[in-house]
Amino acid sequence: MSSVSLRERPGFVWAAPAAVFFALFGLVPIAVVVYLSGTSWNGLGTPQWVGTENWSALLDDSDFLPSLRTTALLTVGTWLVQTPLALLLGVWSAGAQRFRAVLSTVFFLPLLLSTAAIALVFVSLLDPNFGLAASWGKYLGAPDGNFLGDPSRALPTVIFVLAWQFVPFHTLLYQAATRQIPASLYEAAQLDGANTVRQFFAITLPQLRNTIVASSVMMLVGSVTYFESVLLLTNGGPGNATKVLPLHMYQEGFVAFDMGYASVLAVLLVIIGTVLSVVVVRTTGYHRMASDREGL
């Protein structure tokens, strides 16, 4: 048992507001969606119970597996791009370099912008007719400047835009965690002759292991739900090159007005997000990581 006894811990009532909030806005909507997945409903009138009919329709949905594959590619791609960038920037911004505060403030500006605003800005910048892509595309491997309209470039472009938006958030996590690393560890490493690179791999990375796992869980689960950016940037195109599962769910529910089948896709997204989170936590040993500090 830790140095803090159970009687010194905050009681359950401290968690009651958060528990009530989670139940109302987390568990209840999930329960409603699970119910709707067994009904036939166009959004008006009374839903009609149809049992497993909507789930059976998954087998006949030609867009389901491609959208699931695109979602997996987007999830892996965003993690591979965002994690190293956020980690390095977070470690750098935790230091005391000259102009660090000013540069960090500028860099974190994307956090102040809405997803819709960012997507619309990049739609204009990447327009092959009048955007920056028209003149800069030849330097980036796209002489025609058509990034969003080319099937082979659309998904990487979406991943780039998402990284531009969300890397600052994860950088903040790494920045805060890096500042919690005891300076005595670096002082001892310097006395032993370790250079900056050696200190990074021997001290910084091991000390940030919990933050890496926490950031990865949020990144992976969040990427499963990306919707607005894809809708505004490509609307799933060209063809179905960027059609992710959340966009497929939206089109089934609010374009085809098949709320029952859209609820099936929503339930699948909840399951995928939960499984991803559990797999990351279990495979990284995050659940076994002990700490001698209360709450950590």
Image (cartoon, helix red, strand yellow):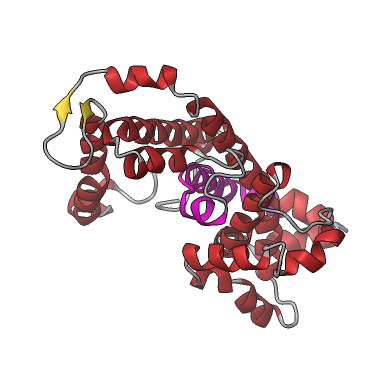
Identity of the residue drawn at 58% across and 62% down: 165
In the rendered view, tell whether residue 99 sits above or below residue 228: below
Q: Which residue lies furthest to the front in this view?
A: 129
In this view of the protein, which residue sits in the foreground, 98 or 141? Answer: 141
Q: Which residue lies furthest to the left in this view?
A: 46
Residue 11 visible to the viewer:
no
Q: Residue 230: horizontal and vertical position, in percent? A: 53, 50
Q: Does the magenta stretch include residue 22?
A: no
210 with respect to 135 (left or right): left
x, y (%) of residue 78? 62, 47
Q: How many marks?
A: 0
Give the camera-side residue of 258 and 270. 258
Q: Is residue 209 magenta?
A: yes
- Residue stretch rendered in magenta on the structure: 204-233
- Left or right: residue 14 versus residue 89 is left
> As rendered, which of 79 and 128 lies closer to the eye?
128
Viewed as shown, does residue 224 lie left or right of 251?
A: right
Q: Residue at x 74, y 61 (%)?
A: 186
Residue 233, quarter of the rendered image:
bottom right
Most prominent secondary structure in the magenta stretch? helix
Q: Which residue is drawn at 65% across and 80% down?
A: 101
Residue 267 in view of the camera:
yes
| Quarter residue 39 falls in | top left
Instruction: Pick the quarter of the image with the N terminus.
Output: top left
Q: Where is residue 10 in the image (x, y as percent from the top left)?
A: 25, 54
Q: Position of residue 229 (x, y in %)?
A: 52, 55
**149 or 77, which is in the foreground?**
149
